[in-house]
Amino acid sequence: MKSLHSKISKPIILIVIIVPIVIYVLFNLSARFYINRQTQDELINVVSNVKSLSIQLLDNTENNELSVDNLNRFQILRSALQISKYSMNTEMVIINQNNRIIFPQDFEDTFLSKEMIDKALDKATEEDKIIRFISNSNSYMFIYEKAEISTLNYKILFIASAASSNVLIQTMNMFLTLTLVISTICTVLVVLSISNKISKPIVRVASATKQLGEGQFIQIDENTDCIEINDLVIGINEMSRKLKHSDEIHKDFLQNASHELRTPLMSIQGYAEGIINNVFTDTKKATGIIAAESKRLNELVEELLTLSRIENGKYIDKFDVININNTLKDYIQRAEGYASMSNKQIELDSVNEILLLFGDDDLLFRAINNILTNAIKYANSKVLVTLKKDGKNIIIRIHDDGLGISESDLPHIFDRFYKGKKGNFGLGLAIAKVSIELMKGSILVTNNNGACFDIILPLYTR
């Protein structure tokens, strides 16, 4: 398994190294091809220009040697060729029928040599054919023509040198190599720097996620110039904050739950031991307290189980379409007995339009009943329940005419195990909140001449 830094840098570095080599090879191949082509064209042009002139320049001779005048004329022709753009790298050599060099007389101002001409003659097997050969590590091309002058047969060799072009290619190769090496080194350094910038924060994030798994809710430095990595770091930090908050809530929940469970259990244990040891003369009263504490303990466990089932999504599969108009009337009827015992009244103000929502009847009842019973408990005389439609939402408002919620309690009213002055376990409103949120709704609470709870749920449309 490779590191991200290695997986990013190695392929790019390999490409950066291979591409200059390919460029270097292709350049040399194309340059060689071009030079050979130019040399070949040069030879063809020289032959075309010189062939007829050389014959015309030569006077008829009666002996086996060219006259001095003819040699001078060849020298003039050679000088003209040297300044021609078609034959700057081409030399002309005249060979007699005995393979003796007639012209030039010496090789001082030429690139020719006796060994080179001999090597060319060894390869001169076919007239009008361009032949390549190498002499002293240099590349040459030549073509020869036969010239018949009187009774004499001569060979005229045209030899082209690629030496000057080779020097040019070598110079260009030197600059090309230097350029490619510098660019390759710079590119490799840039690639390594970029891959390090990419891999380093990801390594930090990977280390942070490992620490998160171990329960260390750390925050990663968000100072990065990459948008995607910055988004990842922000997401990890946000997750860390939420996990830390959830862990704190979980710990508080366990602590509070254990405290709430321990209180009735200790009471039950104390009265049971008192009965066993004949401490209480009135055992009926003691057993009554045990029964009451057992009931309270059972209610607490039931609320804890309900909260757990809601958070684990056990109710989602039970969701169905609910006619809130009829259902709300049923919920109020169930609470009227408690209201009558407290000498309170419940009024319902509902719209005539049928309103539907998608949810679970048991969850909805628990949420509304918890809020409604709290409203009855704190109301002076009346609780007003209002059902209305607001755009694509259903609003159920439960408003009591009591003193309202104290400003210190208001921010914590939905916290688990947070109890007001008449509170029981502090789970009722917490269950109401998570129940409504599970049905894609929300709860708002304000003080308006009493406590006012607004339950907002999305309207179901067929």
Image (tube, grey):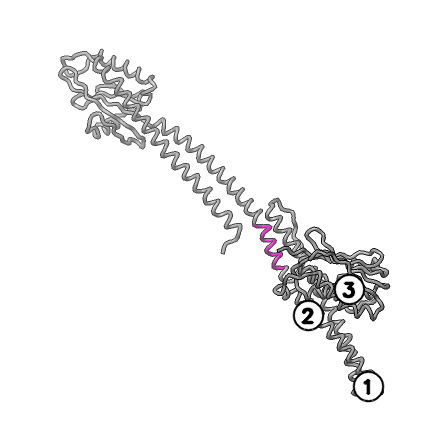
Q: What residue type is disc 1 on?
A: Thr
Residue 305: give its label.
2
Which residue corresponds to the image point at 67% horizontal and 55% vertical from the top-left?
459
Q: Quadrant of residue 275 in the image?
A: bottom right
Q: Is 151 displayed left or right of 49 in the figure?
A: left
Badge 1 density bin: few <14, some 14–19, many ≥20, Cα 10 Å: some
**Disc 2 secondary structure class:** helix
Disc 1 is placed on an element classified as helix
Position of residue 58 in the picture relative to residue 448 (left or right): left
380, 184: nearer the viewer: 380
| Marks 1,3: beta carbons within 8 A | no
- Disc on res. 283: 1
Q: CA distance from mark 2 to mark 1?
A: 32 Å
Range of the magenta residues? 199-211
**Residue lying at the far front of the rendered structure:** 352
Q: Is residue 224 above or below residue 265?
A: above
Q: Which mark is residue 372?
A: 3
208 lies above or below 59: below
Q: Position of residue 357 (x, y in %)?
A: 67, 59
Q: Residues within 10 Å of mark 3 (few under 14, many from 20)?
A: many
